[in-house]
Image: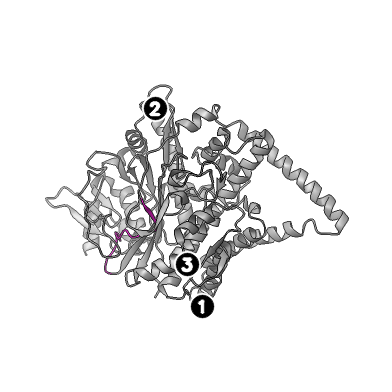
Amino acid sequence: MAIPKVMGIETEYGISSSAHGDFNPVLASSMLINSYAGDLRRIRWDYEQESPLRDARGFEPVQERQPTEEDLGLANVILTNGARYYVDHAHPEYSTPECATPRELVVHDKAGERILERSLASVADLLPPGERLSIYKNNTDGKGNSYGCHENYLVARSLPFARLVRDLTPFFVTRQIFTGAGKVGTEGSRADGGRIPFQISQRADFFEAEVGLETTLKRPIINTRDEPHADPEKYRRLHCIGGDANLCEVALFLKVGTTAIVLKMIEDELLPDLSLEEPVPALHAVSRDPSCRELVRLRDGRRIRALELQWEYLDHAKKFVKEAEATPENAEVLAWWEAVLAGIEEEPLSLHRELDWVAKFRLLEAYRERDRLDWRDAKLAMIDLQYHDVRRGRGLYHRLAGAGKVERLTTDEEIERAVVEPPEDTRAYFRGRCVARYAHSIAAASWDSIIFDTGKDALQRIPLREPLRGTKAHVEHILEASADAPALIAALQA
Amino acid sequence: MPQEHEQKRVQRKSGGEAGNQGGQVEATKKGEKLKEEMDDILEEIDSVLEENAEEFVKSYVQKGGE
């Protein structure tokens, strides 16, 4: 039986400095985050339940423990909106709070952009005169180095992992046609010396395996990290590493909305076998065909377009939603899904208001025509990169949005609220509100715990093992009635 | 919201199809309007683009993440 899809997105942002020479992105990221976090940075991250090397297929961890960002004293903060904002490798990373609907997740992912933009303003005073940082919500430097945008979905532990791999892989290979953020050229081991001028996905070049635990090399289409951050008997947290970071709200909404519905259909074992003959080469081929006409071969012998495979998923989804989950949220996902597939069917370039790769491609084509540029011209690579700049004055996506040239699903007011307020329908509400109300009594926190230090001998650990407990409906009255942390703990234990 | 969007799409599609001759004129006008619109966007974007594209692109090097 399908379970509710609690979900979140982790985005590693690109970071660069105007002082190229001795730039240290790790320290700069840490400074950026700390300058924004202020007093909140004294709450530590509780690592007790973390085990990123545990494998969903049942293997034991084999690697030795590496020094963590915590060991190095780098920024790692929990915000009042329930998000985690920290340094991961050499990037600032923003992990949204857990959200219960795709729309809420869009709002919170967009709030992340605003937080990075504000951090740039707050860090400016700390930098040497003349130096300035830039932040990009993208996934590659165009030189073979990629950083991730990972989606996380709560799935039932009872679901056999092999079934998930079978039914999700063809979906992930083909959803790029609406989730892709677009990229000039090819790179890394997939670089082809300029034959392919533009591709749909930022990330496809970096994927080499079908299934696996890795995230930094030999990246797999299905990642097996088994770290539920919730009751492990009941749940998995499916960690999806293949998506591009989105700026267009429709693309972002569809990325998480369609995936959530597909996962529910997989849990209910409703999907037929749509396995691809060769998923990894198909992933690359689909990304490299902005006309969306390339054929992929299914194991049943059919050769069809990525778009047709998406139509099949949509047909099943319509039936599933009608019979099992006729909610307004699902109706909105299906309506956009259908509208976008129909748009791709007729003319992919018509979707420049909805999809990042199309908005970017159209801009590049316009520049090519006006300035008579060859695809290898540096100006086009610059436009590709600057599309993702988080500053609303500088980022080309944001300039398009500001001029009303892209479709919006949210309002600026909603996004501003999500910069400080948590979602109301998940445990993120409890986490965020506790950080807002009792920050000075919290020693540490994580996705599934808050550890209070109320001055007594023992610290008090409040577990949050159920992602859908600790919502506004559950705890608002308790929080309102508890003036301080000891009162809260007493009320929770009563 | 997507419903409204779909309607818009249908309107867009049917916009230039009223009669052959009229349709072509309409389509040309539309094409000009689209081009003007695009020129306006490019002008706006010109004003925020970094100055030295070569240097800007070359200096953007990231460490891998994840």
What residue does disc 3 label? A261
Question: Disc 1 vs disc 3: Cβ atoms closer than 8 Å?
Answer: no
Q: Amino acid at mark 1?
A: Glu
Mark before the other along the chain sequence, 1 or 3: 3
Residue A467 or A63: which is nearer the viewer?
A63
- Which chain letter goes with mark 2? A
Quadrant hosting residue A398: top right
What residue does disc 2 label? A125
The residue segment tinted magenta is A218-233
Q: Is residue A344 magenta?
A: no
Can marks 2 and 1 be said to lie on one chain? Answer: yes
Mark before the other along the chain sequence, 3 or 2: 2
Give the answer, above or below, for where A405 lies relative to A160.
Answer: above
Instruction: Measure how far apart labels 3 and 2 are at the Cα level.
Output: 45 Å
What residue does disc 1 label? A323
Residue at image position (42%, 53%) is A207
The x and y percentages for residue A47 are 24, 51
Is residue A4 at least partly visible in the picture?
no
Instruction: Measure how far apart labels 2 and 1 are at the Cα level.
Output: 57 Å
Q: Is residue A291 left or right of residue A471?
A: right
Is residue A375 at least partly visible in the picture?
yes
Q: Amino acid at mark 2?
A: Asp
The x and y percentages for residue A256 are 47, 59
Majority SS type along the magenta span: loop
The x and y percentages for residue B10 are 71, 61
Give the answer, above or below, for where A65 lies relative to A392.
Answer: below
